Amino acid sequence: MKVKFLPKGGFNKSGAFVEVGDDGTVSKKADEFEIQRHLTLDLICKDVSFGVGIEVKSDLKKAEAEDDKDQPERISSRSIRATGVIQESRWSQFELSILGSPGRHRTIDVSIGELPENELVRVGGVGGIDDIDLDVDESFYLSIYLTTERFDDLRKELSFPGAALKIRFDIGRFSNFFATWSPSISEGRVIKYLSSPSDVENESEVPDEFWRRAKREKPADEDDIDFKFDLSESDLDISVYRPIVGIIGPMPGEPTDGDEFGAADEDLAPGLSTGAPASSHRWPNLEKLEGEITKIRRRLGVVSVVSVFALVVFILWSLG
């Protein structure tokens, strides 16, 4: 399919892209993909793995090196990789697609790396490539770079058994993503990515202002509220969840003789012993109760049911 720009397209008539057939005609029912915000994607990451990359360079001979600066820099990198699965929105499902392509995707290739001081987030798509040297399927990627300290924190949390990695971000904050207009920000729809301006058949008709807004650049007009990003907003949120395993009794290594709690089991208040339920001290021994009732019946003979009930209540009160 071809991609065309409509100068008056979109809900606000500020420009939109449409996909057209080989004949170049635009159908009245064609979806108009415009610049949108609040396209929040929730990812649950599968197949999470940790890797180390080491770049090896041969040392220069000392005779050929004028000083230490001529020696090659040894570089190693660490990364966390996963497949992010887009979760259903409140209304329907968000999907990703390349403008001009019918393909739809519900997964994103996630990579998390480290930088010494800065942090960075990149989101994009790759169109299918099929030639003599390359055979690349259409896909989408999310690249995250954390400081070394925060990368170590994340890796530590993910090392626990059962840890789950979740990522939440507004893809509408990133360059060249477009979607149809909707009255609800929770309506899942197809989000289109423009790989290159050259993919637009009438590229020359696209105003510079539209490209600036599509790249999410700082507004030329400070009153442009629609695209004036709040710097306090996060570009992306990463969460790690892991199950809490319930254990009956003390944790492994936890003292049970009261040396750190100020009292052993026998010194605890009634009902607080670790060996029995808190209410167990209130119930008398049933055999003892039955024996007492038998003795009373032998002494009194046949008594009314009411009298026996009253005696039972009295005994329970006296033994309790």
Image (spheres, grey):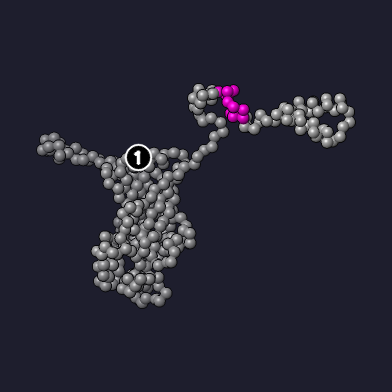
Q: Residue at x 10, y 38 (%)?
A: 66
Of 59 and 131, nearer the camera is: 59
Under circle 1, the secondary element is helix
Please name the amino acid that badge 1 sits on.
Answer: Asp
* Residue 286 location, quadrant: top right
Does 167 sit left or right of 147 as displayed? right
* Residue 153 location, quadrant: top left
Q: Name the residue tied to disc 1.
A: 152
Which part of the image, by quadrant, shows the C terminus? Answer: top right
Does 120 sit left or right of 243 as displayed? left
Q: Residue at x 33, y 49 (%)?
A: 144
Which part of the image, by quadrant, shows the N terminus? Answer: bottom left
Q: Is residue 188 visible?
A: no
In the image, residue 234 sits, relative to residue 35, either above or below, namely above
| Magenta: main secondary structure | loop
The image position of residue 114, as x and y in percent, is: 31, 44
Q: Is residue 270 visible?
A: yes
Residue 10 within the magenta-colored segment of the rendering:
no
Of 134 and 169, nearer the camera is: 169
- Label 1: how many residues lie within 10 Å, few (<14), some (14-19) or many (20+)? some
